[in-house]
Image (cartoon, helix red, strand yellow):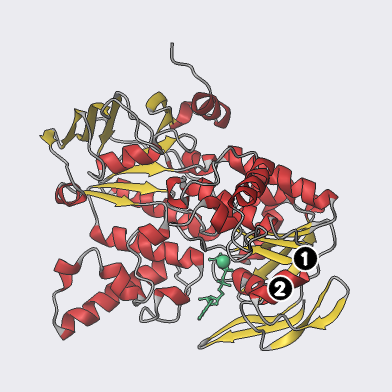
Amino acid sequence: MTGIHKRFPGVHALKGVDLTVDYGEVHAVVGENGAGKSTLMLVLAGVYQPDSGSIHFNGHQAVSIRSERHAQELGIAIVYQERSLFSNLSVAENIYAGRQPLNRFGSIDTDALTRQSRDLLAHLELEIDPRLPLDHLSFAHQQMVEVAKALSLNAKLLILDEPTAALTRVETEALFRVIQRLQSQSVGVIYISHRLDEIFQIARHATVLKDGEKQGTLEVEKTTPRELVRMMVGREMLYDFQARTIPADAPTLLQVTNLSDPPGDVPGEVRLRDINLSLRRGEILAIAGLEGSGRDELALSLFGARPLASGTICVEGQPQAIRSPYDAIQHGIGYLPPDRKESGLFLEMAISDNIASGSLGRFGRWWWSESRRDQTAEQYRQQLQIASPTVQRLVQTLSGGNQQKVVLSKWLLVDPQILIVNEPTRGIDVSVKVEVHRLLRQLADEGKAIIVISSELPEVLAVADTIAVMRAGRIAGQMPRAEASEEQIMTLASFDTHH
Ligand SMILES: Nc1ncnc2c1ncn2[C@@H]1O[C@H](COP(=O)(O)OP(=O)(O)OP(=O)(O)O)[C@@H](O)[C@H]1O
Ligand SMILES: [Mg+2]
């Protein structure tokens, strides 16, 4: 790609970007939220037409990639940052949507469809029944289906736009093995991720974008993480938090006793068993654990979004019946879910409307309250560096990471006593990650209690005062931050230490 320019109304998203990817290499594209990474990939995948610039691909001189289908015909496959699957179709139908194998009567050959899908999923080390409806799968497995769909095209160039944002370690490692296999078949891979350790693990080159401009291409082997971050952010980044001390007399805000799900299995869900937790004012508790460990179920239960068989939840020493999210909010419990699309983000509405959407009672319906609402939204826009000139813009025009910041702002404005955040920095770039962690600590300092659920161990270790590790629906272990290590957390999360 040479000299690619792309403008949206009011935004010059790509300013003459060059990118060269070799056969058989993994080439990372990195940069802060809104830097232009996804836009560049959408140009390459035929979704957007560039305003100017040229593309040379696989021996074709100066191709103009007219559509997604044209890109596929040329041998370019993409896994989009935003999910693009149909939740009511089966896994196999999603993988082969529009390209289903036909039998000799000209109708869809369901057996072949199932068989081919199963083979593809096996490459990804997944044992999923391809006949299942997609929405029976976990979020991580749905993401893997996206990857399987891209692999089914047998492309010469595979674009992965934050494929691991929703994946756990096990799936990420499986994906990396697939990428290595593709490399040996001289497939080129463009890899976008905010997890820089992944870049150092698999990429040969990294091209850095900042504000739509290319900053340079680095040879990863000869680069340090610090250098890479400096090029991305344009300055040195410091990330050394001091350990926090919670006052010894801080009252207990949340006490969870013997929380258990009813016996009997619900497909796709983990049964919670005998959960005991206690959270003081000012404390940040991180819950670590693999996908399927019960982290999400626990969060939903505390938020009243799942029925519980037994156990008590005490808020400020009072046992409370929390049977719905409404009850939870009434008792000062807030929940930021991991998936933007399910988190009540209204894509066709303005940033300010979205931020205010959890606190409508606070603003009223008069014209002056509208300007007060916009001022409030504006504060969050600045604090979290939401990349948009104004808060009047529609959320759908924001980059993925910036949409996440809007959801986070909404809950910060609701200002609950107990805030549960599930993957709070998914898709958020390094510099804002630090800002989000700082904010969570600030909330705790103000006397709130925070529960952080995260698959990123560096994040767990960076923000938590206390770490609880879940496995198979139980708390497998709990320890103060000062006594925790990545190895210990992984061991507790992965192996049965319960006798
Ligand atoms: N359809 C659109 N309409 C208007 N502006 C857009 C559109 N798509 C992207 N933009 C803007 O273009 C810029 C680049 O966005 P892009 O999605 O490429 O960022 P990114 O580097 O992928 O960020 P992230 O890491 O958050 O995914 C942003 O300022 C974004 O708001
Ligand atoms: Mg993006």
At label 2, counting other C-alpha atoms closer than 10 Å, the crowd grade (few under 14, some 14-19, many 20 or more) is many
* Numbered label tally: 2
At numbered mark 1, what does the secondary structure look like: helix, strand or loop?
Answer: strand
- Residue 303: x percent and y percent? 25, 45
Q: Which residue is mark 1?
A: 217
Residue ID for mark 2? 71
Farthest residue to the front: give it.
105
Residue occupying image coordinates x 17% and y 85%: 367
- 186 or 206, which is in the foreground? 186
Instruction: Indicate the quadrant of ligand 2 in the picture.
Output: bottom right
**56 over 458 or under it: above or below:** below
Above or below 3: residue 246: above
Quadrant of the image containing the C terminus: top left
Q: Amino acid at mark 1?
A: Thr
Q: Residue at x 31, y 36 (%)?
A: 246
Q: Choose top left, top right, bottom left or bottom right for residue 296.
A: top left
Residue at figure coordinates x 39%, y 78% from the top left: 394
Image x and y of residue 140, in percent: 51, 47
Please tell me which of labels 1 and 2 falls first in the chain.
2
Q: Nearer the viewer, residue 380 or 120?
A: 120
Q: In the image, 459: left or right of 99?
A: left
Q: Is residue 384 visible?
A: no
- Measuring from the top left, give residue 389's x and y in whole percent: 44, 81
Q: Which mark is residue 101?
A: none
